[in-house]
Image (cartoon, helix red, strand yellow):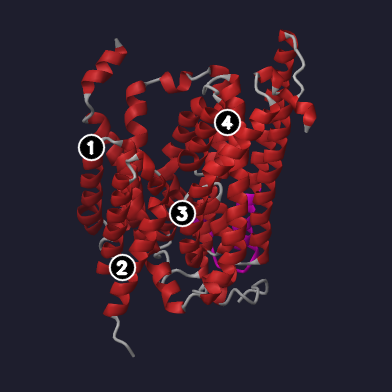
Amino acid sequence: MSASSISTPITAADAESDLAEFDRTTSRWGRLTMIAGLILSVAGPLYLVFFTGLDISAAQLWTAFAAVAAVFAIIWIVEPVTYFPILGPAAMYQAFMIGNISSKLLPSALVAQTRIGAKPGTRRGDFAAVAAICGAAAVHLVSLALFVGILGTWLISIIPVDVIDVARLYVLPSVLGAVIVQAILTIKQLRITIIAVAIALLVQFVLLPLVPAIAFLTTGIAVIGTIIVSWLARDRKPAAAVEN
Amino acid sequence: MSPTTSSIVSAAGESTDILAIANMPVLWICAAGVFAVILIQSVIYMKAARKAAPAAEITGPELKTAFRSGAIAAIGPSLAVVMVAIALLAVFGTPAVLVRIGLIGSAAYETGAASIAAGSAGAELGGPTYTQNVFAIAFFAMSMGGAMWMLATLILTPLMKRGGTKLAKVNPAAMSIVPGAALLGAFIALGVAEVPKSMIHVYALLTSAAVMGLCAAVGRSRKRAWLREWGLGFAIVAGLVVAYMAHTAGTPVA
């Protein structure tokens, strides 16, 4: 414990190689642990699909994945690109496994940086962020394991059946109502919000009744439609200024 | 019935007893594995940071302080996630909720993905058509979606490290429009798709939206900023309470 607090004067070359060593360790182990997490997270559903005697065809799986990809594929790319400048390479491998980046990990990192007076973007800031994310991960793992993993099963067993039935039936609209408001407030683009609502209504109440076969594609169509119309109807003035 | 059919999978997955299959030991083991991986990752990172601390002009005690403040700051948001996770237990079972909603993903993306996947199988999440087969398809699609996020991170991080932030500078106008439009388009379309299902769905949707809006408005003041973290949890519970009242009011008491 005391070893880390002894400040030995180090040369610039030493510092350079120590930092390079940190980068090597975090990028190698960050990647390895993330690959392990990726494999474990798909192992469960793959086991269900192939080894439990469920009657599921490959076509069904591909259709489901394609429908999800039509909606979220852009976000898969955009999110890592957006968070990279804020998190730095080391914390990227932590953040995308622990989740809840904007609502938990970024605030944690910011609080820690403020607490010890480290500026974001500096080495001091990066290290404070990594330590803060480790702290946040510890709290998150413990609270999940305790309240959901251990007590959750017990909670489910004592909650009346009709309450669980209602939760099962109506949890989706209850999540989406809040998420829509959150998305509108975070993105703060009135024009795009209006376009998205108009296209969603059009797809759901005009296009779908006309072509019922597109049922599982509606969200994907709405996403692509919203992107295209938002792009065509964008405010061109500031964009032109950037180009010059 | 095929000979490989296990006792909990009845009639090749036509059963609606989701929890029987969603709480299988194999899934618990995989979920525990993800926990272990994150734990190991944190230990490796802390060790590496402590070793290189002097080079980064940060002291050991400062690292410890950063760890502690990060941990304390995460208590509120973590408990808020716990609340959402418990609300979703009945739909996905504990292991899937732990991995998909609690870690890797988030309630918004994962319920969205699950609902889209269930729809692609002609079923409705949580409804009478939500069989064991549909759960497996939805869980598969959610997990593959999450895997794509990780894959993008694995591929893009080294590229961006080399190329600086060049990627984000490619087209600033597109970067300011496309992600926002994709997010709003996805969630608004998913929300609108709930409307024709029943009036109770509409009540749940509107209640949840209203409570979230209220939490965001009140949470604007610095003193009540915690409300913003808890907004999603409160909104889901409020939506479910209203749905419960409407549901029990609508069914005649036997």
Looking at marks 4 and 1 on the same chain, the residue that comes earlier in the sequence is marked by 4
Which x, y percent locates residue B63?
65, 30
Per the image, label 4 sits on a secondary structure element best described as helix
Q: What chain does mark 3 sit on?
A: A
Q: Residues within 10 Å of mark 1 (few under 14, many from 20)?
A: few
Q: Nearer the viewer, mark 4 or mark 1?
A: 4
10 Å crowding of disc 2: few (<14), some (14-19), many (20+): many
How crowded is the residue under tag 3: few (<14 C-alpha within 10 Å), some, or many (20+)?
Answer: many
Quarter of the image with the N terminus of chain B is: bottom right
Q: Give the residue number, with chain letter if any, for mark 1.
A: A190
How far is mark 3 from mark 2, CA to CA? 31 Å
| Residue A54 in view (yes/no) | no
Residue A58: within the magenta? yes
Question: Does dot 1 land on a helix, a strand or a loop?
Answer: helix
Same subunit: marks 2 and 1: no
Instruction: Name the residue beneath numbered marker 3.
Output: A64
